[in-house]
Image (spheres, helix red, strand yellow):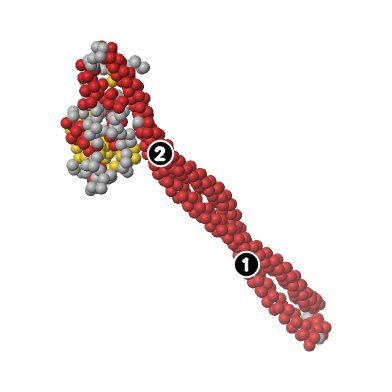
Amino acid sequence: MKKKIISSLVMSTVTLSALSPIFEVIADTTTDIAKQEATIASAQSEKDKAQSQVDTIQLKVDNLLKQQENTKKKIEDVKNQARALNEQIEKLSQSIAERTDALEAQARSAQLNNTSNSSLNAVINSKSLTEAIQRITAIATVSSANKQMLNEQIKEQKSLNQKSDTVKQNYNQYENLKKNLDAQATDLRTQQAELKVATLNYQAIIETAQDKKASLIKQRAAAEAVAKKEAEKAKKIAEIQAVAEETYKNQTRFLNDSTKGTSNNKASSTSTTPSGGKPSNSSTTTSSEASENTPSNDSYNSSNTVAGSKASSDSNTSITNNSSGNDSITPPKTGTPGYNPYAGGGCTDYVWQYFAAKGIYIANIVNGNGGFWGTNGVSQGVLRRTSLAPGVIASGFTDQFTGYGTSTTSGSSPYGHVAVVTAVHPDGTFDVQEAGYGGTFPWGNVRKNLSPQNVVFLLPN
């Protein structure tokens, strides 16, 4: 029994140790998730900065576009002014040329005809002094007017030329401004495009990190699910271990009390035996019963035999544990609390402890190997047959159910197997929880979808 408890402790430790890598995976995954979250936060911050710069540049671009529109309008106005001035200058130049030609013709005519003689002839040929004066005055007026008009046209031409020069300067200025604005707009659009590319890159980093984060979260969830299952398994093993320890304590108390009781009975028999005579009938009967009820199981020792014979001598006897004052032990066939007659770590031990945890104690079955529970257990009144359902005992020798072999004959164990049914499926197969000392089943092992063919299903009486 001590070996059984130690085995349970070791198995529990191994199970908990097996959880350590899972917890490490969960911790590493959580760290990786945190890294991805930091990457997402950093990329999002840079993306926001880039987007802010894009928005600022867009405002500048919009402002430049307005300036370009205004500049284009001013350039168009300057072009119109230049065209108007050019027309005026052209007309004025033509008029000046015509007037200059006329004056030049007059001058040539005066030189050819001797102007003074012409003027004299105009006076001589005048009918009166008044007419002469008028003719001379007219000639002088015409000549002066032509000269004055010519001078004014020349001045106007100079003014128009100055205006033309101003318009040309304005045109050149606006053209340079337009080129400068175009260059700025091109530069801003280039910056804007680069920032948009950077924004898209940051978005790609964010999405990649989010995908990695989602994948890591799934991995962590899977690891946590495994850890939860392993923890539940460890909990069940711990519960079984606790039951085993309590069973060991109760068994020890029971055996001690049984040994004390046997010693007291022997002392009583000795005191009533006549000097030199044989023991009394009651002592003989007890010895005979002990011999007849000794189980064939190898797990029984001499103390167990005494306890078994003591318990089986009276099916209605109740033995009180004096150390605790409240442990009532009912003898077979209902089994004895705190007394496990089955080999530690084996399939029968696991089933006994499973039902003991529920307050049901399976009594010793002579030739109580797992495969014989369906026959010897029933014939000895310890068990009864029932139908397949969760919570019942499965017993048999089939290859699939036994699952491991310890003999050279066929693939199945000559000892058979017992397990606790945990679930029944629509196709008629069932799941079990079990142990298998000497086989391949660890304590609390789970198998699924076993065939019910040639398997017997039982419940304790």
Residue 275 visible in this rendered orientation of the protein:
yes
Q: Residue at x 21, y 23 (%)?
A: 288
Q: Position of residue 315 (x, y in %)?
A: 21, 20
The amino acid sitting under disc 2 is Thr
Residues at circles 1 and 2 in contact by the CB criterion of under 8 Å: no
- For the C terminus, give its image quadrant: top left
Q: What residue type is labelled 1?
A: Lys
Label 1 neighbour load within 10 Å: few <14, some 14-19, many 20+: some
Residue in the image at 37% along x and 39% along y: 229
List x then y, in percent, for residue 168: 68, 68
Horizontal side, residue 269 vs residue 31: left or right: left
Q: Mark 1 points at which residue?
A: 79
Which residue is rendered at x = 28% and y = 44% of the image? 406
Q: Earlier in the sequence, mark 1 or mark 2?
A: 2
Q: Give the structural element (helix, strand or loop) at label 2.
A: helix
Residue labelled with disc 2: 15
